[in-house]
Amino acid sequence: MSNDFLTNMFSLEGQVALVAGASSGIGAEFASALAKAGANVVLGARRTDRIQRLADDIAAETGRKTLAVALDVTSGDSVRAAFDAAEEAIGTVTIICNNAGIGRPKYALDDTEEDWDITMETNLKGMWRVGTEAARRMQAAGKGGSIINTASVLGLMVGPQQLTYATSKAGVIQMTKVMALEWQRFGIRVNALCPGYFKTEINDKFLDSDLGQRMLKATPAKRHGELAELVPSMLMFASPTSSFTTGVALPVDGAHTLRIA
C-alpha cells in the first residue's frame, strides 16, 4: 500500500534540478535520486562523456527528462552557458545541487599558492558562480527554489592536511547563510549539507589505506557513510515541504562532528 502523504510531501514533480559535479560520487547519486523523486534533471560536469551516459541511464530508468551539459564551475561563461542550455531544453532551474569540488590534502607548510587558488576557485568561488546565477534566473522568472551547497564536516571542524579544503568549506557555510538571509524574500532557500566521510573517487584510495581505516575506526560510527545515506537530507532540502527551512548547515556524519578531539 502506497503512502500518499509521504509521497506528496517530498515529491519534486514539475521541478527542474541542476546538479553541478554530476559525473561521479555524490553528484551522480543526487542526480539519480532527484529524477526518482519526480524532477527533470540537468547533469553538469567537465567530463561530458560520463554525464551523457548517466543522463541516458537515468532517463531510461525514471522516464524523466534529462540533459547533460558541459559545466566548468571555474568559468563564468561555462556556468551561464549551462543555464542557458537547461532553460532552452527543459525550463527554469528551481533546484540546485551545488556539488563540484576538489581536495588536495597536504600539510599547511607544503601547500602552494596554486593549491590554494585552485581549491578556492573550485570549491568556493565555483559554488558562488552557480548559486548566484541560479538565483538571478529564478528571480527573473518569478520562481522560488532551493539551492543546496555541498560543504563538509571540515567546514565545521578541522583536521591535519586540510588547511585549504577546510577553509574553502567553512567559506561555503558562511556563504550559504548570507545567501539564505538575502534571498528568502524571493522564495529562494539556501542550505548546506556537511557530509562526513563518504567513499568517492576523491578519497577512496585513502579510505582503503591502513591510515584511512584507522581514522574511520576512531570515529563514533567506525565506518564511512554510504552515498544513499546522504540522499534523504538532500531531498528534504530540495522539496517544497522545507519551505521554512533555510540557512542550515546540516552534518550527515554519524556523529563525527561530536567527537571529542
Image: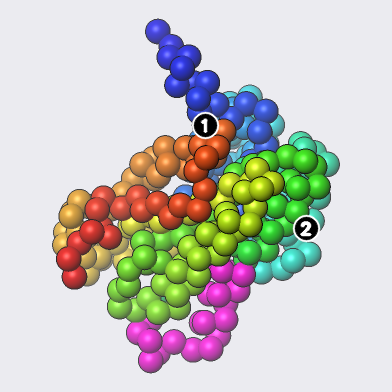
User: Can residue 111 be found in the magenta stretch?
Assistant: yes
Give the labeled residue for mark 2: 80
- Residue 153: x %, y % from top left: 36, 61
Q: Residue at x 34, y 45 (%)?
A: 226
User: Which amino acid, mark 1?
Assistant: Thr
Residue 61 can be seen in this image: no
Q: Residue at x 45, y 75 (%)?
A: 167
Direction from residue 66 to residue 254 in the image, left or right: left
Which disc is residue 37 wearing?
Answer: none
Q: Which secondary structure is most common in the magenta stretch?
A: helix
Quarter location, residue 132: bottom right
In the picture, measured across the screen, residue 129 lies left or right of residue 163, that is: right
Observer-nearest residue: 230 or 22?
A: 230
The amino acid type, in three-letter code, at marker 2 is Arg
Disc 1 designates what residue? 241
SS class, disc 2: helix
Which region shows up in magenta?
Answer: 106-125
**At which x and y percent is residue 249?**
43, 55
Q: Please determine whether, in this image, residue 122 is positioned above or below residue 160.
A: above
Q: Are marks 1 and 2 in contact (CB under 8 Å)?
A: no
The crowd level at tag 2 (other Cα within 10 Å; few <14, some 14-19, many 20+) is: some
User: Who comes first in sequence, dot 1 or dot 2?
Assistant: 2
Q: Nearer the viewer, mark 1 or mark 2?
A: 1
Between 203 and 147, the one nearer to me in the picture: 147
Does residue 170 lie above or below 245 as drawn?
below
SS class of the residue under badge 1?
A: helix
Q: Residues within 10 Å of mark 1 (few under 14, many from 20)?
A: some
Q: Is residue 252 visible?
A: yes
- Quadrant of image for the C terminus: bottom left
